[in-house]
Image: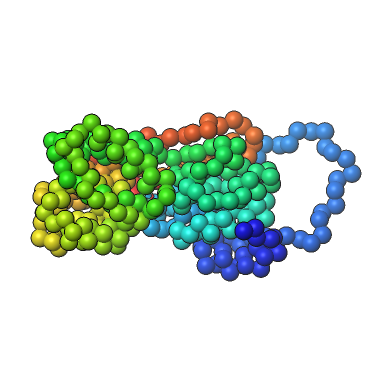
Amino acid sequence: MKISLPLISAGLALLLLAQGCARPPAIASATPPPAPAFASPSPRPKKTYKDLVVGFSQIGSESEWRTADTISIKQEAARLGVDLIFMDAQQEQENQILAIRTFIAEKVDVIGISAVVETGWGDVFQEAKAAGIPIIFVDRLADVAGDEYVTYLGSDFLEEGRKAARAMVGLTGGQAEIVELSGTIDSAPAVDRSNGFRQILQDYPGMQIIDSESGDFTRARGLEVMRTMLQKHGRSITAVFAQNDDMGLGAIQAIQEYGLKPGVDIKIVSVDAEKEAFEAMIAGTLNATVECNPLLGPQFFDLALKVANGEPVPKRVPSIEGVFYPGNAAQILPTRKY
Ligand code: AHR
């Protein structure tokens, strides 16, 4: 569905207030400014961070990871003096579509977006392209044509899934009855982590995924889904792959409630490498966490300025990430920033 600009203007103040917009938008004037008598012969001066207006559509605040990502983006904008219009979509794709249309109406220089799901975006990215506003995907890419965005900055979710599987093989000696707590349905990390995990397991016939269900990347759902899994499969579960730490922490609680020892009776591998995951490894309740870096603010604004000035940027900018185990968790914990 297309939303007209007058409709956007009417609903905008309300939406921005509800979704934590960093600054109110300028309402477009009915009378356009007078056109210059003739075009200036001098080239357009390069923008600096202080000239840059950036719209950023964030998914929500479903995990500690997301909170750290939001802080990184807002803090870096403030540090650089970038004018940031930040909109929180509360995990609703419709809100992200409306946010992009808002940014187009606002004539921002660059749009950053972490796409809540991969599909179902309609024409909105084409609309941004037609308006001449470059799109940078941050953290999560959408399933759109290559010419509808300039670059994608973020993790290699497929490799994260593979890393989690390799860690699981090492922890279980290649024999496990695994329950998977997957992320938001149709989201890039859920799809890719699932695929990456299965790619590695193909070579280990003793590793079986006995059940898989979405915990929507939240701790509350991780707890709920793991309780159900334990009711269903009981002690036959020997391992859990939680596609993020928050769900893993929920699963730990469910296993304890059930009277088993997480990390001992049931091996657990999760993704993100949040501080709380390190604390769980120190406590012996989590066996490994695969890093997914949310501190993307500095790289994002570096790319945004280059893009706004028409400078070339790579189509894919990956984050560099590791895997952590209990062995040195206590030593590493103080260095973790999220
Ligand atoms: O897109 C990154 C994922 O989204 C993180 O792993 C998860 O914690 C977050 O909600």
**Residue occupying image coordinates x 81% and y 56%:** 32
| Residue, far right | 37
Residue in the picture at 16% in, 55% down: 233
| In front of the other: 332 or 16 | 16
Residue under the point 82% across and 54% down: 33
User: Quick one: 196 or 152, which is closer to the camera?
Assistant: 196
Residue 315 percent coordinates (x, y): 53, 33
The image's colouring method is rainbow
- Is residue 232 found left or right of 151 in the rendered image? left
Quadrant of image for the N terminus: bottom right
Q: Judge from the rendering whether residue 116 lies leftward or rightward of residue 5; answer left or right.
A: left
Q: Is residue 76 visible?
A: no
**Which residue is depicted at the point 65% across and 48% down?**
127
Q: Left or right: where does residue 71 sit relative to residue 145?
A: left
> Percent position (x, y) of residue 221?
30, 60
Q: Quadrant of residue 110?
A: top right
Can the viewer see residue 17?
Answer: yes
Residue 63 to residue 12: above or below: above
> Does 231 sit above or below residue 274?
below
Where does the image place residue 5, in percent across and percent down from the top left?
Answer: 69, 60
Mark count: 0
| x and y, in percent, of residue 226 in the image | 23, 58
Foreground residue among 72 and 130 = 130
